[in-house]
Structures are given as structure tokens and as C-alpha cells.
Amino acid sequence: MTHPYFGSERPRVLAHRGFVPADSEGIVENTFAAFAAAHALGVRYVESDCHLSADGTVILFHDSDLSRVAGDPRPIADVGDRELENLMADRGGLVTLAQALDAFPTLFFNLDVKAESAAETVGRLVAPHADRVLLTSFSDRTRERALRAAHAAGGRPATSAGTIRIAALVAAVASGVPWLIGRALRGIDAVQVPERRGPIRIVSPRMIRAVHRAGVEMHVWTVNDADGMRRLLAAGVDGIVTDRADRAMTIVAEER
């Protein structure tokens, strides 16, 4: 049975860390303003990342520290909620996972659990919203920990493969052995990968066919140029993760 997360028409545009308009002043990624901008575009899916503040609150923020976004070298885990709110007030507004789920009830969230310490809290928070949440992590252990917490709280969010599962899938597709491919994709709803990793091409017609035969979707990140979007959609991928949700929405509308 297809998870409700995938109930809408394909291909999917996943707004990477929300959407920051090119002409925006003072708005940065993973903020309330960035999610509101994605929502205003008509985007259905947003991608974000989960860390824990010093107060134990799940914060939607990509990096483990504030250096790049706020010029502050401290780790997110060492800063309290009130201070984070003050730091982000003129950058689009801090947003917690709980706030995002409540404030944007029609958005679907693709959540990368970056901090292992956040996994159980993330799982509990998303459980009541599981039909519109996909949980993932580069660490399959962290991903599975978050999923177990969600299941224990009565929710069954969708999930995409972590690094170990992706490596197993790449090897399985290269071998052409169906049961190895099935094992790599067991319990997985989506494969979310870059087109290449160094010299290794991950997204290929063979990979797309193998994933689709298993009833799993293929999403590619992070694709910002129009030619790349059109080429990948023509190849049959199911979703594009992008910083240019405006461009992707236009291209997807042309493809439908």
C-alpha cells in the first residue's frame, strides 16, 4: 500500500530547506519565512533538518552550529531557545519542528534527522502527523531510532534510505541480483540521492528501473538548473529536491 505521503501527483518538487526568493532581504533557509515562501509558491513538500537546542527543543536547522547562517560559532546544542529566537528574528524567524507542523498543516515535511540526540523526540512529535511526514537521516541507525519512536507513539511516517542502505542498493543494482535489491529496499518508501557521488554515478536508468520495480520512489538532490531538472524528469525520477522551487514548479507544470 502506498503511504499517504505519496498521495499527490508526481513528479514532486521538494523545496530544499524551504524557499528563499532571490530578491528577499534578511530571509535565510530553514526559517518560518522560508517555509511560508514555499507554501505561497504552491509547493506541497518541504525538506528540512532536525537538531536539538540546549533546551531539548527540535529546531529546524541544517548545520550543527550557527556559523554560516548567523556568524556565531556555537553549536545549536549549546544555545537555548530564547537566544536562538533572538538570533534568527531578523533572518526570517526561528522555527521549531512543532511550530512548523502546526503552522503549515497542508505542507508535507521531508525531515533529515541530523542530530542523533534528536531522533526520539522527532519521532514522537511527528507521530500525530505521520501521513504527511517522511523521516530520513544519513545514519540508518538514527533514522531507525526516530521511526521506532514514531511507531511507539502511534504514527507510521514514510522513510527514505540512509547511507548504508544506499551503498547496499548501489552494489545490488550493479550485481543485478533481484533479492539483493529487495533486501536493500526493504521497509523503504523512497530513495533520495545526489545524481553522482564523486566519480560514481548513482542515478542511472538501471537504478531508476530497479527502484520502481520495488515500488519505491526516486528523488534526486540538490538540482537547481533547469536543464538538469528536465533531464532527470525525462529519465523518470519521481521528485526533485531543489533550492529553486520556483523554477522547478514551472518545469513540472510543463511536464504534466
Image (cartoon, rainbow, N blue to C red):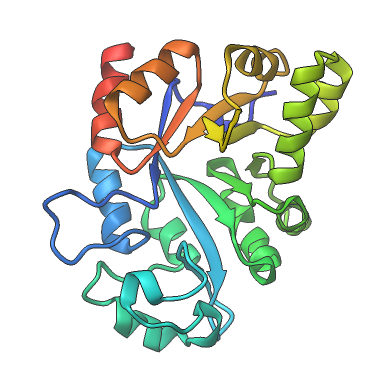
Q: Decide: is 128 above or below 5.
A: below
* Percent coordinates x, y for residue 214 in the rendering: 73, 18
Residue in front for this viewpoint, 36 or 206: 206
Horizontal side of 183 relative to 211 (left or right) equals: right
Horizontal side of 12 relative to 129 (left or right) equals: left
| Quadrant (top left/top right/bottom left/bottom right) for the N terminus | top right
Residue in front for this viewpoint, 233 or 10: 233
Tell me which corner region of the image, top left, top right, bottom left or bottom right, holds residue 71: bottom left
Residue in front for this viewpoint, 256 or 182: 182
Horizontal side of 89 relative to 189 (left or right) equals: left
* Residue 185 appears in view: no
Tell me which corner region of the image, top left, top right, bottom left or bottom right, holds residue 31: bottom left
Q: Decide: is 217 above or below 103.
A: above
Tell me which corner region of the image, top left, top right, bottom left or bottom right, holds residue 113: bottom right
| Quadrant (top left/top right/bottom left/bottom right) for the C terminus | top left
* Percent coordinates x, y for residue 55 in the rendering: 55, 85
* Percent coordinates x, y for residue 126 in the rendering: 59, 56
At horizontal 60% and vertical 54% (from top left) the residue drawn is 128
* Residue 91 appears in view: yes
At horizontal 49% and vertical 65% (from top left) the residue drawn is 98
